[in-house]
Image: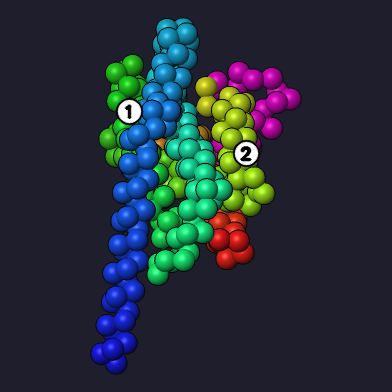
């Protein structure tokens, strides 16, 4: 029994060491990749600022807190870009043979995924803090600090699910890097046709049902409701359905890929 307990402790220690090593490596890669840093810390905030400069004055004249409206979109954009970058980094590791080499070591290959997701969590936190600070400087007025904190945590959860979905899509492809590049290419256009930057009520009636129920819209609307101190309602339940489906499907894709080919 003592031997068994000692073996279990050694396995746990080895797994934790592998996760720490993977996290450290991914953070170093992030710090050395200027494009990733720009994507995380600059682009979401610049997008929010650009829309606020163009439409903010007109919106404020009608009593509409457009800065707060944009903050929810920028928060989602921040975690979405993190997920896209994560899928690309993981795809590069697969095609370079790194994960195949990890499999030959006395550690579980999923420790690489854990390290990846921890790094993504850190990047998302930094990116979210940046856009929130910029939104507050632009005059956004959340209903409460507790609502802002809850929206922050919900955005982080959304980001981790997106990491699994995007990574799963890339890993299931025969050309992971090419698929990851495609994901990064289409995520912003999809965001633009959601409720991220323009209220649903201003869109043509025939487009409202399509845009209201595309995956990004209920997620953004959920965070927007939390920032406004409101109950998310139907959008919250719809976002939960999308996120639950993405979590199950993404985790299955990733784990199946590793069992089959890594």
- Considering the numbered disc 1 on the image, is that residue within a helix, a strand or a loop? helix
The CA span between labels 2 and 1 is 30 Å
**Colour style of the rendered protein structure:** rainbow
Q: Position of residue 233 (x, y in %)?
A: 51, 42
Sequence order check: which comes first, mark 2 or mark 1?
Answer: 1
Can residue 40 be seen here? The reply is: no
Residue at 56% from the left image edge and 28% from the top image edge: 188
Pick the quarter of the image with the N terminus: bottom left
Which residue occupies the foreground of this view, 253 or 112? 112
Disc 2 + disc 1, Cβ < 8 Å: no
Left or right? Give the position of 221 relative to 170: left
Q: With respect to residue 7, does 249 lie above or below? A: above
Residue appearing at x 49%, y 48% in the figure: 93
| Secondary structure of the residue carrying numbered label 2 | helix
* Above or below, comparing residue 106 to residue 99 in the picture: below
Q: Nearer the viewer, residue 148 or 191?
A: 191
Circle 1 sits on which residue? 130
Look at the image and tell me whether residue 199 can be seen: yes
Looking at the picture, tell me which residue is in the foreground, 98 or 41. Answer: 98
Which residue lies at the image location 34% right of the left edge and 61% below the top edge? 18
Q: Residues within 10 Å of mark 1 (few under 14, many from 20)?
A: some
The magenta segment? 198-218
Give the left or right position of residue 134, taking residue 76 as reference.
left
Q: Residue at x 47, y 59 (%)?
A: 101
Of labels 2 and 1, the one closer to you: 2
Residue 141 on the magenta segment: no
In the rendered image, which residue does mark 2 sit on?
178
Identify the disc placed on residue 145: none
Q: Quadrant of residue 189?
A: top right
């Amino acid at each position: 029994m003592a031997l068994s307990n000692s073996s279990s402790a050694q396995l746990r220690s080895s797994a934790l060491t592998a996760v720490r090593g993977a996290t450290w490596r991914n953070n170093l890669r992030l710090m050395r990749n200027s494009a990733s840093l720009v994507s995380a810390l600059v682009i979401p905030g610049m997008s929010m600022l650009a829309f606020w400069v163009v439409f903010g004055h007109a919106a404020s004249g009608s009593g509409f807190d457009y800065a707060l409206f944009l903050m929810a979109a920028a928060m989602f954009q921040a975690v979405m870009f993190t997920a896209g970058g994560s899928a690309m980094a993981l795809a590069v590791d697969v095609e370079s043979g790194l994960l195949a080499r990890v499999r030959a070591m006395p550690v579980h290959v999923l420790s690489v995924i854990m390290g990846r997701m921890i790094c993504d969590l850190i990047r998302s936190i930094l990116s979210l803090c940046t856009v929130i600070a910029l939104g507050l400087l632009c005059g956004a007025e959340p209903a409460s600090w507790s609502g802002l904190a809850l929206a922050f945590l919900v955005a982080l959860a959304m980001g981790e699910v997106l990491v699994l979905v995007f990574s799963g899509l890339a890993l299931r492809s025969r050309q992971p890097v090419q698929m990851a590049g495609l994901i990064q290419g289409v995520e912003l256009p999809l965001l633009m046709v959601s409720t991220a930057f323009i209220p649903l009520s201003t869109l043509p009636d025939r487009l409202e049902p399509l845009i209201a129920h595309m995956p990004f819209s209920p997620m953004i609307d959920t965070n927007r409701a939390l920032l406004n101190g409101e109950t998310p309602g139907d959008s919250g339940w719809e976002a939960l359905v999308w996120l639950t489906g993405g979590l199950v499907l993404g985790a299955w894709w990733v784990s199946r890929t590793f069992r089959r080919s890594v």
